[in-house]
Image (tube, rainbow, N blue to C red):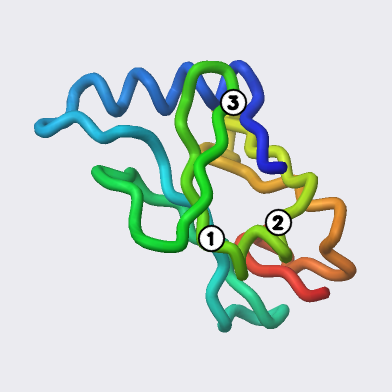
Amino acid sequence: MITLTEIAAKRVQDIASEMSPEPIGIRVGVKGGGCSGFTYVLEFAHEVRVGERELESHGVKIVSDKKSLLYLLGTQIDYRNELGNIGFKFENPGAKRTCGCGESFGI
């Protein structure tokens, strides 16, 4: 299961409400790359693609492919707005190592 904090869900909803066409939610995944092996992917989704699973957290639809779900099990996505630390942050309990910027991880 992938979840959003209440703050992250509110931020997604605020951004999505200003987009045209308005997305149905967010797409979360992983791809190879980054200094630790995998990179997180987070984008707005306008449709559910074939083979994707649908989840929901705090009223926000989350879609992800099955392969990414294996790497993201138990992940919580937060939104931070602090000096030098602004944006969505992945807290992945399955990550054995992460890079300094927190945008890539290894299993």
- Give the x, y percent position of residue 92: 78, 52
- Residue 74 shown left or right of residue 68 in the figure: right
Sequence-wise, the earlier of marks 1 and 3 is 1
Amino acid marked by disc 2: Leu
- 2 or 1: tag closer to the N-terminus: 1
Q: Earlier in the sequence, mark 2 or mark 3?
A: 3
Residue assigned mark 1: 29
**Kind of residue indicated by mark 3:** Ser
**Quadrant hosting residue 33:** bottom right
What whole-number distance in Å separates the C-alpha atoms at marks 2 and 1? 8 Å
Q: Secondary structure at mark 1?
A: strand
Q: What residue is at 73 percent from the left and 69 percent from the top?
A: 105
Q: Answer few, some or many: residues within 10 Å of disc 2's Cα (few below 14, many 20 plus, some between 14 and 19).
A: many
Q: Which residue is nearer to you in this view: 55 or 29? A: 55
Residue labelled with disc 2: 72
Secondary structure under badge 2? helix
Where does the image place residue 47, in percent across and percent down from the top left? 27, 46
Q: Are marks 2 and 1 in contact (CB under 8 Å)?
A: yes
Q: CA distance from mark 1 to mark 3?
A: 16 Å
Q: Pointer 1 and pointer 3: residues touching (CB < 8 Å)?
A: no
User: At 78% from the left edge and 75% from the top edge, which residue is drawn?
Assistant: 106
Local SS, label 3: strand
Q: Which residue is mark 3?
A: 57
